[in-house]
Every structure is written in C-alpha cells, then in structure tokens.
Image (cartoon, helix red, strand yellow):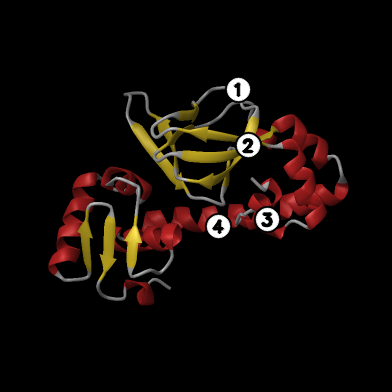
Amino acid sequence: MDIELLIKNSSFFKGLNGEHRIELASICSLKSLRKREYLFHEGEFGKSMFLLIGGNVQLHKNTEDGREVVIRIVKPGEIFAEVVLFEADCFPVSARAVTPVDVLVFPRDGIHRLLAQEGFRSDFIAQLMLKQRYLTERIQELSTKDVEYRFFTFLRDQYGEKELIHTPLSKKDIAAGIGTTPESLSRLIQRLTEDEIIAWKGKEIKILSNPWKWLG
C-alpha cells in the first residue's frame, strides 16, 4: 500500500508539499478495525492522531446519565484526534468504527519532531486552520438548518452529488451524524419517499429529483 499516495489524496494533507508528505509517511502506520470496534475511548491518554482512509468512524461523548452524544461521523480523507497534539493529553471523545475501517496512525511524538521544523510547522498549521473554519461552519449549519437540509448535505459530503448512493451506514448512524433522532429521520424519509424525492431500499438510496441545487 502506497502510504504517501494515501496522504496525498486526503482532503486534509493534499495542501502539504511533497517533501512534507514523505516525512509524514515515514512516521505513520496502518491500522484496521472491525465494525463497532473502538479505536480509542474518551479520557484515554492520546498518543496519536489519525487519518481515515477507508470506512466511517463515529466520534461521540458520553453524558453523565450514560447517553451517547454524536459529535460527527468522519469520512475517508479526514483527520481526527489532532486535539492531542496541542490542546489536551487525553482524547475528549470516543471513536468507534461504524463500518470496517482502515486508518493511518500518526504518533504524537513523531508529529512533534516534524513540527520543530519551521517549514513543516507553517504548512501543517495552515491546514489545521482550514479545517477549523470548516468545522465552525458545520456547527453553525447543524444549529440553524432543518433536518432535510442537513440530511442532503450529509449525503453530499459523504458520497458526492450522485443519483444512486450505496451507504454502509445504518439509518441510526446517519441520524446521529446529522444531529437528529432515528424517529425524526424515519419521518423525513417517509415524506421524501411519498414526495418522490428519494427511494431508499436496504443500503441503496436513489435520488429521484435534484436536491443538490438548493443546498448552496
């Protein structure tokens, strides 16, 4: 497996120059997870950050009464747990595979050695700022947009503007990913089906109209 190519093709690291991608490839390792297997738990000491290269990972927090609150669902090409590089010694969330998963593991010590180089540090922090801006926009979106808008935005972000989508995610996972309940998602799906906007059968979602045009 060409680790450098995987790094180059990721949405986060594609902005790094070639030399820095080679340096990253030299310090990372590949790890695979089964569906529902945990990569790490909230409160554990954070030794690494990760790049998802296949599958989906759910990030969630546990409330005092034992409920899981989903923060987001990571898609291939995205990094996560980078908070342990700068802000925290422990993981602030848990990470669980919602499908079979492959990740690249970047040890914190190795990243810190690279960050000691001024060129790498400037390049890397620029990518972090772009990601932070994206996450800020996503938080605003979740708090201000309705469920239908969030549903189609989620599908577009995960799979692109396709007419036929094959998703390995359950409806429960998708509901968590768009910040709603499974019951609310089921009602939305029923309405979209009756209005002949989508047809959902098993793991296949057929887009019958063109919802992408009004997402902006």
Q: Which image quarter: residue 34?
A: top left
Which mark, residue 134? 4
Q: CA distance from mark 3 to mark 1?
A: 28 Å
Q: CA distance from mark 4 to mark 2?
A: 19 Å
Where does the image place residue 29, in percent across and percent down from the top left?
66, 35
> Which element is circle 2 on?
strand
Q: Which residue is denoted by mark 1 in the rendering?
A: 45
Q: Residues within 10 Å of mark 3 (few under 14, many from 20)?
A: some
Q: Secondary structure at mark 4?
A: helix
Report which residue position mark 3 lands on. 8
Q: CA distance from mark 3 to mark 4?
A: 20 Å
From the viewer's side, name the closer residue of 100 and 130. 100
Q: CA distance from mark 2 to mark 3?
A: 17 Å
Which of the two marks, 3 or 4, is nearer to us in this view?
3
* Cα gap from disc 2 to disc 1, whole angstroms: 12 Å
- First in residue order: circle 4 vs circle 1: 1
Residue at image mark 2: 49
The residue mark sitting in front, 2 or 3, is: 3
Residue 130 against residue 39 in the figure, above or below? below
Mark closer to the observer (3, 1): 3
Quadrant for the N terminus in the image: top right
Q: Residues within 10 Å of mark 2 (few under 14, many from 20)?
A: many
Q: Residue at x 32, y 66 (%)?
A: 164
Badge 4: few (under 14), some or many (20 or more) residues near its Cα, within 10 Å? few
Q: In the rendered image of this protein, does residue 42 appear above or below residue 195?
A: above
